Image (cartoon, rainbow, N blue to C red):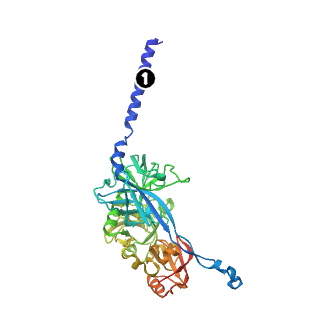
Amino acid sequence: MKSLAERSRCLAALFLVVCAIGANARGALPEFTELIESSSPAVVKINTVEKARSRSQFQLPRNQQDIPELFRHLFEPRQMPERSVQSMGSGFIVSEDGYVLTNNHVIDGADEIQVRLVDRREYVAKVVGTDERSDLALLKIDEKNLPTLKLARDDDLKVGQWVLAIGSPFGLDFSASAGIVSAIGRSIPSEKNENYVPFIQTDVAINPGNSGGPLFNLEGEVVGINSQIYTRSGGSIGLSFAIPVSVARGVMEQLKSKGRVDRGWLGVVIQEVDRDLAASFGLDKPAGALVAQMDPAGPAAKSGIKVGDVILRFGKANIESSGDLPHAVGVATPGSEVPVTLVREGRKKVVDVTVGTLGGDAVASAETESDQGGRLGLVIDGIEPELLKQWQLRGGVVVQQVIPGGAGAKAGLRRGDVIVQIGFNGVESLADYDKVVEALPSDSLLPIRFYRRGRALFRTISISD
């Protein structure tokens, strides 16, 4: 049996070991103070104002003759007053001469955009370009010698790596939160069922107001742009998603040079390959993207790809799941020739594909937007074949931009709406649209039918030439 002195020495030694272990554990945790101090000056808060347009409201009774003269004024058109809707988000400065990167959804529809720095300087920002597919937007403020953030090298991020976010959650300016990378390459389809971003998943606390803010590695480099959260309560539950810097860099360069983003396009509709399908196609395991439909005039069809082919590799990118293909095709240079490895009837085959162009949305300048909007105050474009199939439409035209104060804005039209009827005339093509709009009478209330997110809606529209 040990003496009291020996027991005391053992306890003292054990205490020293525990203290040493605790010190080592504390030392292993990252220290963020220097990173936050050096990076915060280039992070900005973005406040936006959207003015809801005045619009006519009226009720149309079934039989106006039954209404006494005294009450008929109640059914006449009435102008509703304008009101402003304010919103906020985050962003960061990418060049000393005032370029700011943020999310598209932060500034989408805004009439006024204000950028505020951590030192409380405030600037009015102009939109250089937006890209709805990647949810990114590039702004410009009139200032020089601004602090900037450095974008990280591509594809260096690993699961388990520490990351830090700075933004303005719920309006709490320049708040920091930290966590780890939970997964990379997450495929999250958009409302239009498009999937061009391999998202970074983290457990960093991201809340409304963080959108557009930077996600840092421990070297203080931006590895992502915080974009989405998964939540049932409206707040963070540890599932946050950021746009990788590899995507943001290419989008930013195109927005800066031409105000829009052009992506690679194959013209196929794909689906996941499950275990049974893999066995039926002669694959060892579920992998690749199964071509379920295709545009007969698209690049894939022209190159010889067929319905039923399973695409396993696009250029240098392995296609492990169907969501990998849009990521790889989207960053491909339009017009370039890319080898595609596929399985057809149990045999591997390589097909060279000349990548097509999936055009982006250009921002109209203030000097020409009125002319571009035409009589309806709308910038429109043709509809993509995939959307025709998805919404089961014969034709239509897509609203690319709504000019503030125009007839389209007053009617409540939004970017992305697909117009199929104006007045009592169908609209199936750009030629139809131009012909119908040119013949529309002035100062008459006309029905307009369009699709929004696949749902058909009627509104009324009036032109005042």
Residue that extends furthest to the front in the rendered view of this protein: 70
Work out whether residue 279 can be spotted: no
Given residues 82 and 234, the one toward you in this image is 82
Q: Quadrant of residue 199?
A: bottom left
Given residues 344 and 68, the one toward you in this image is 68
Residue 361 on image: x %, y %: 40, 71
* As drawn, 340 above or below 73: above
Q: How many marks?
A: 1
Residue, disc 1: 14
Work out whether residue 399 can be spotted: yes
Q: Quadrant of residue 146?
A: bottom left
Three-letter amino acid code at disc 1?
Answer: Leu
Given residues 390 and 129, the one toward you in this image is 129
Residue drawn where x is 48% and y is 60% of the image: 87
* As drawn, 373 above or below 350: below
Given residues 354 and 309, the one toward you in this image is 354
Residue drawn where x is 32% and y is 62% of the image: 142
Residue drawn where x is 36% and y is 75% of the image: 367
* As drawn, 65 above or below 174: below
Residue 184 on image: x %, y %: 41, 53
Helix, strand or loop status at disc 1: helix
Q: Residues within 10 Å of mark 1 (few under 14, many from 20)?
A: few
Residue 237 on image: x %, y %: 51, 49
Residue 410 on image: x %, y %: 51, 75
